[in-house]
Amino acid sequence: MSAAGNLKRTALVAVMTLLPGAGVGVALASKAGAARSPAPSAAKVAKHAVSPLRYEHASQTFTNCTPVQVMAFAQRIHVRCAAAVGGIRFFALGTANAPNVARVLSILTTAQVAGRDLTILFDASDLSGASIGCQTNDCRLILAAGFGR
């Protein structure tokens, strides 16, 4: 059999293997959806809606950041954004919680390499990052980080 024939056969086997699993997943998802309670009314959702730019505390804010530098130090990791937001250009995270640092560092570097903007949650009034080398005049601690499509 030719190389093209082998490739077609391999692709066909892969598709045939995945399709039944996808069907089971769809069936289970629809059953799970049917067992859930009905969707809340629009009035109920509006009553509990949170502004998209604010989080739990008034000083916690989401911002967009075009990453131009990601650094890893002994005490912190940080990202430098192309444009400052309210004078803040750096967002940092202490390295004490290694699994969290690995997750956030992966998000930061992936966004920078892929040329994607980050969404970062930070507390503008929190100056405690100074203990890890985050300057109080232009740096805040990362509370959450991510990027979308």
Image: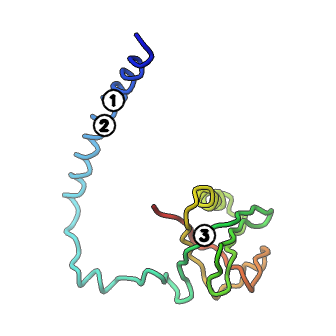
- Say if mark 1 contacts mark 2, CB within 8 Å: yes
Q: Which residue is mark 1?
A: 17
Q: Which residue is mark 3?
A: 66
Element on which disc 2 rests: helix
The quadrant of the rendering that contains the N terminus is top left
Q: CA distance from mark 1 to mark 2?
A: 7 Å
Q: Amino acid at mark 1?
A: Thr
Q: Amino acid at mark 2?
A: Gly
Question: Residue 25 location, x and y as percent?
Answer: 29, 44
- Say if mark 3 contacts mark 1, CB within 8 Å: no
Q: Amino acid at mark 3?
A: Thr
Of the pair 148 and 57, the residue shown nearer to us? 148
Of the pair 64 and 128, the residue shown nearer to us? 64
Element on which disc 3 rests: loop
Q: Which residue is mark 2?
A: 21
Mark 2 vs mark 3, foreground winner is 3
Q: Closer to the N terminus: mark 3 or mark 1?
A: 1
Q: Closer to the N terminus: mark 2 or mark 3?
A: 2
Question: Residue 47 location, x and y as percent?
Answer: 30, 86
Question: Residue 9 location, x and y as percent?
Answer: 36, 20
